[in-house]
Image (cartoon, rainbow, N blue to C red):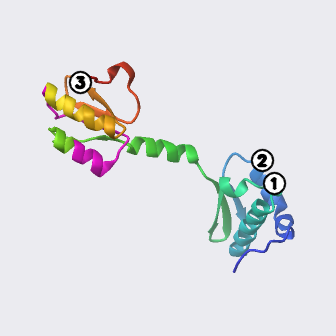
Amino acid sequence: MGYSGNKAAVERVKPLLDQMLRSEHDLIWPSENAHMLCYHIREGMTVAQSLKIDPYTELKKEWVIRNKGSRVVAERKNPIALEALQAAMSKMELEDVRNVMEIVGAAILHKAHQMYFPDAVFTPEDSLSLYNWCQRNGYHLVVAEVGVTITKDDPGEAAWTP
């Protein structure tokens, strides 16, 4: 069953939408017919977004509406937590990767934003070879006393250059 495009859908749940605008926390509404209340709230948010009814146009992007038995729960979406999780997952430490070919293979396979290889031991020729690959593929190379890091972010003075 699709949503209507009628402004009345917004008016029907306006008090609840107003609560969502004012709230910084999740909301819970008890209901004898929670399924239909969920439907009406989602419909009101969708219509407000498509008809650009201020101040409700952004509610659909900010809230998730769920039916939990005899109650309706409005939960804020949390993009900050998602960004933090993505940032944490884009950094990898890969042990037992020791030479240039293994590092290049790992970089191609994992495509992580930053990869640290603690077991890598390089000669100056190996560093030059990996440096050239990194330059062609958008990575920066950091060679330390213990291990090697390749990263998409510019490490500044820590970057290894021939």
**What span is in magenta?**
104-123
Q: Quarter of the image containing the N terminus?
A: bottom right
Judge by depth and name the residue closer to the eye, 87 or 66.
87
Q: Residues within 10 Å of mark 3 (few under 14, many from 20)?
A: some
Judge by depth and name the residue closer to the eye, 149 or 126.
126
Number of labels in the image equals 3
On the question of residue 116 being in view, the answer is no
- The answer to which image quadrant residue 16 occupies is bottom right
Residue 113, label in figure: none
Residue receiving disc 2:
22
Q: Quarter of the image containing the C terminus?
A: top left
Q: Nearer the viewer, mark 2 or mark 3?
A: 3
Helix, strand or loop status at disc 1: helix
Amino acid type indicated by mark 1: Asp
- Residue 32 point in image, percent of width and height: 73, 74
In the rendered image, the vertical position of residue 21 relative to residue 117, given as above or below: below
Question: Which residue corresponds to the image point at 33% horizontal and 21% vertical from the top-left?
Answer: 158
Amino acid type indicated by mark 3: Ala
Would residue 111 be found to the left or right of residue 105 on screen?
Answer: right
Residue 144, label in figure: 3
Question: Which residue corresponds to the image point at 73% horizontal and 53% vertical from the top-left?
Answer: 58
Q: Earlier in the sequence, mark 2 or mark 3?
A: 2
The span from disc 2 to disc 1 (Cα, nearest Å) is 6 Å
- Residue 126 point in image, percent of width and height: 16, 32
- The answer to which image quadrant residue 104 occupies is top left
Amino acid type indicated by mark 2: Arg
Helix, strand or loop status at disc 2: helix
Q: Earlier in the sequence, mark 3 or mark 1?
A: 1
Residue receiving disc 1:
18
